[in-house]
Image (cartoon, rainbow, N blue to C red):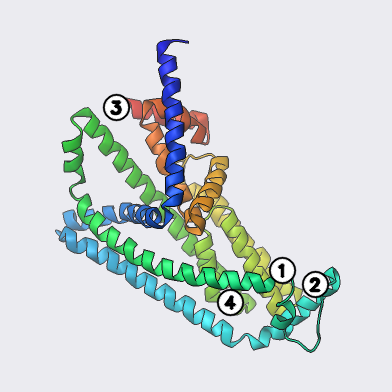
Amino acid sequence: MTKDQYSKNILYLLLFCSVVIMGFLMKVTASFMLPVVISVLLSCVFYPIVKRLNEKLKFPWVLGSIVMVLIVVVIIMVLSTIIGTSLTTFLSQYPKYESKFLYLYKMCADTFEFQFYDDKSFFENIWGQLKVREFVQKTAISFSGDVLAFTKNVGMILLFIVFLLIEMRYSHEKVDAIFQGKNSRRVMTVTRKIITETVHFLSIKFFISLATGALVFICCLIAGVDFAVLWAFLAFVMNFIPTFGSIFSVLITTLFTLIQFYPNSLRIIFIFVSITAVNMILGNIVEPRIEGKNLGISPFVILVSLTFWGWMWGFIGMIIAVPLMMIVKIICENVSFLHPIAIILGNKPADTQKELSEVEEEA
C-alpha cells in the first residue's frame, strides 16, 4: 500500500467517524437543529426572489426579506384556518358516522373474536380493546407537546429566515474574505448550485403537490366525499414524501370513503382508482419529465434517506430528506476525494461521471 493510498484510507475513516458523531449530535440537538435546517432551506428558496426584487425593482433588501416572511405567515394562517374549520366540522358531524364505525367494528369483532356490546357506542366498545386506552392517552400527551413545539418552532424559523436573508446579501463578500482566488470562486459556485438545485426541486415539488391536491379535491367533489378540502390538503402535504406519502394519502382517503359510503362500493372504487391514478401520473410521469436529470439520486438512496431522516427528525425529516441528500451529493461532486461517494449517491454512474467532469472543467 502506497503512502497516498494509506493517507486516503485514514481520511475516509476519519470522515466516517465525523459523520457518525455529527449524526449523533443532530439527533440529540434535534429541537435546535431542525428549525435551523428548515430556515436555511427556505432561505435558499426565498433568496433569488429577494435578490431579483432588489436588483430589478430596487426594492430594499431588508424590506424584501420581511415581506417574504410576512407572505409565509399569511399562508400559514390561511392553511391553519382551513384545517381547523375542516376538523371542527368533522367533529360536529361525527354522530352521523357513529353507526358506520360501529357496524365496521362489529365486522372486525366477529372476524377477530373481539368483545362487542350492542348497548355501547363505538368508542366505548374499542376503549378496552388492543390497548386503545393507553394509545389514546400517549397520543394526546404527545400531540399536545407537538403542538406547543410546532408553535415555538414556527416562530423561531420565521425569525431565522428574516435574519438569514438579510445576512445573505453579504455572502459573496464573506466568502471572498475567508477564501482567496480560486477557492473563493469554487465555494461560490457550489453555493449557487445548491441554491439553484434546491429552488428547482422545491418549486417543482410544490406545484406538483398543489396539482395533486387540486385533482384529489375534484375527485372527492365528484364522488361526494365529505371534507374534500381536508383530503386535498393531506394529498398536498404527503406528496412531499416520495412514494410512502402518496400511499398513505390514498389509503387514508379511501378508508374514510369506505366509512362514509359502505356498502356502496362504486364510489369507494372510484376514489381509490382516481386518486391512485393522479398520484402515479403526476409523480411518475409528469414530475420526472419536468425535473429532468437535475436530481440524479439513486431511488434506493432516497428510500434510505427517508428512513434515516424520518428516524432522526420524524415527519418533518422525511419531508426535507431529499433536499438534504441533494445538497450532500452536490458537495461530494465538488470535493475531489468525495467523488466516489457522489457516484454511490447518484442514479446512473455515467450521468454522475459527466457531472464530475463538468465540475473539474469549471475548476
Inspect the image, locate mark 3, and give the three-letter code of the amino acid beneath it.
Ala
Inspect the image, locate mark 4, and give the three-letter code of the amino acid beneath it.
Leu
Which residue, as the protein is rendered here, is positioned at the far top?
A: 2
Whichever of callouts 1 and 3 sits on the residue coming sooner in the sequence is 1
Q: Please rate how many residues cluster around mark 3, counting C-alpha atoms within 10 Å: few if below 14, some from 14 to 19, many from 20.
A: few
Whichever of callouts 2 and 1 sits on the residue coming sooner in the sequence is 2
The residue pinned by badge 4 equals: 221
Whichever of callouts 4 and 3 sits on the residue coming sooner in the sequence is 4
Residue 278: % across, % down: 59, 61
Q: Please rate how many residues cluster around mark 2, counting C-alpha atoms within 10 Å: few if below 14, some from 14 to 19, many from 20.
A: few
The residue pinned by badge 1 equals: 269
Tell which tag, 4 or 3, sits nearer the viewer: 3
The numbered dot on residue 363 is 3
Inspect the image, locate mark 2, and give the three-letter code of the amino acid beneath it.
Cys
Q: Please rate how many residues cluster around mark 4, counting C-alpha atoms within 10 Å: few if below 14, some from 14 to 19, many from 20.
A: some
Q: CA distance from mark 4 to mark 3?
A: 55 Å
The residue pinned by badge 2 equals: 108
Left or right of 189, for residue 250: right
Q: Nearer the viewer, residue 162 or 120?
A: 120
Residue 360: % across, % down: 34, 26
Tell which tag, 1 or 3, sits nearer the viewer: 3
Tell which tag, 3 or 2, sits nearer the viewer: 2
